[in-house]
Amino acid sequence: MNKPHPAFKLWMETDEGYVFGPGVYRLLKAIKKTGTLKEASQELGMSYRYAWGLIKKAEAKLEESLIDASKGGRLGGGSSVITHLGEGFIEDFERIQAQWKDFVAT
């Protein structure tokens, strides 16, 4: 028999509901790595439209930006930079996950 162990899914919300969880976290981390929302979405196997929607929904509820994006043109050249708020969410998410792992290990 497999031994049961505690598990949880971490997300952050406002009074209006879900704002930030594993999907947005992975997307922001991929944007940091690749430098663009387009490349980040491709790396994660999601459509650009879906990825953009995740970011926009979260930003609408937060009333602040998680990324600063600049458009490219026909030849590309756009970029995305994580804002201070976005960086804070990444750090908080990682800190809480690490605390949970420590808790489960004890």
Image (spheres, grey):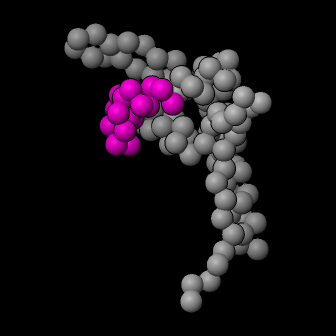
What residue occupies the far bottom of the structure in this picture? 1
Please say whether residue 55 is visible from this viewpoint. yes
Query: Residue 70, image x and y in percent?
Result: 42, 13
Secondary structure predominantly adopted by residues drawn in magenta: helix
Query: Residue pushed farthest left?
Result: 75
Compared across the picture, whether 6 is left or right of 49 comes to right
Which quadrant of the figure has residue 79?
A: top left
Q: In this view, does 106 lie above or below 95?
A: below
Q: In this view, does 33 lie above or below 58?
A: below
Q: Is residue 23 left or right of residue 89?
A: left
Task: Name which residue lies at 62% across and 83% down.
Answer: 3
* Among the 4 quarters of the image, the one containing residue 62: top right
Quadrant of the drawing holding the C terminus: bottom right
- Residue lying at 51% horizontally and 35% vertically, measured from the top left: 28
Q: Does the magenta stretch include residue 51?
A: yes
- Residue 89 in sight from this viewpoint: no
The percent coordinates of residue 99 (x first, y second) are: 73, 57
Q: Quadrant of residue 19?
A: top right
**Residue positioned 52% across, 18% down in the render:** 68
Q: In this view, does 78 lie to the left or right of 55?
A: left
Tell me which residue sits at (42%, 31%) in the image.
50
Closest to the observer, 69 or 20: 20
- The magenta region covers 36-54
Q: Is residue 12 magenta?
A: no
